[in-house]
Image (tube, helix red, strand yellow):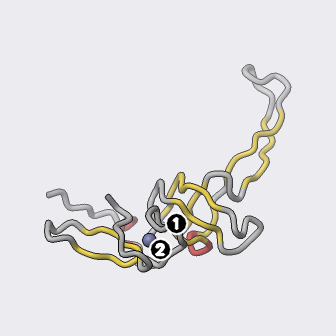
Amino acid sequence: MKYSTSSNLDNPNFPPIKKNDKVKVLSGKDKGKEGQVLKVDRTNNKIIVEDINKITKAVKPDQKNPQGGFVVKENFLNASKVMVICPSCKKTTRISHITLPTGKKVRSCKHCSEHIDK
Ligand SMILES: [Zn+2]
């Protein structure tokens, strides 16, 4: 068994959110919107969610794009601003952590008790 010494994985303040989770935004300009988690930065408590918290970035002209211009991309938002949506009951939910008989730890939905991690 591999043992990770990375402290990134042990950030106790980070909510139980993982890449590819569906989440709902609880506050800010995108409040109420839903999207898929594209990136998780556990060290800084931040995540990137598809189509949420978009910013327009100016791009300098280069060979590929001689006119320059703007690109719209997602910016990091605070992980505490979102809540995971249960894939089974489709509700935003608190997460409980359970350990299967096999020893594997999975997240489970507090509404319907279905496992969020397969
Ligand atoms: Zn559920």
The residue tagged 2 is 15
Residue drawn 61% across the image and 67% down it: 24
Give percent across and percent down for residue 21.
48, 59
Foreground pick, 31 / 78: 31
Q: Eyeballing the image, is 34 above or below 81?
A: above
Badge 1 residue CB within 8 Å of ligand 1: yes
Most foreground residue, 87 or 70: 87
Q: Quadrant of ligand 1?
A: bottom left
Residue at 77% x, 24% y is 65
In the rendered image, which residue does mark 1 sit on?
A: 90
Q: Position of residue 116 (x, y in %)?
A: 38, 65
Disc 1 secondary structure class = loop
Instruction: Kindly identify the residue that appears in the image at 63 percent across and 61 percent down.
Output: 34
Q: Is residue 22 left or right of residue 113?
A: right
The N terminus sits in image quarter = bottom left
Q: Which mark is residue 60?
A: none
Mark 2 residue element: loop
Point out residue 5 in the picture as x, y percentages from the top left corner: 27, 64
Quadrant in the rendering for residue 8:
bottom left
Query: What residue is rendered at 18% in x and 57% in y?
Result: 2
Q: How many circles with numbers are drawn on the protein?
A: 2
N-term-proximal mark, 1 vs 2:
2
Closer to the eye: label 1 or 2:
1
Measured Cα–Cα span from mark 1 to mark 2:
19 Å
Q: In this view, which residue lies farthest toward the top?
A: 63
* Residue type marked 2: Pro
Q: Amino acid at mark 1?
A: Lys
- Which picture quadrant has residue 36? bottom right
Crowd around label 2: few <14 · some 14–19 · many ≥20 (10 Å): some
Q: Which quadrant of the view contains residue 4? A: bottom left
Task: Please say if 70 is above or below 61.
Answer: below
Rendered view: 39 above or below 91: above
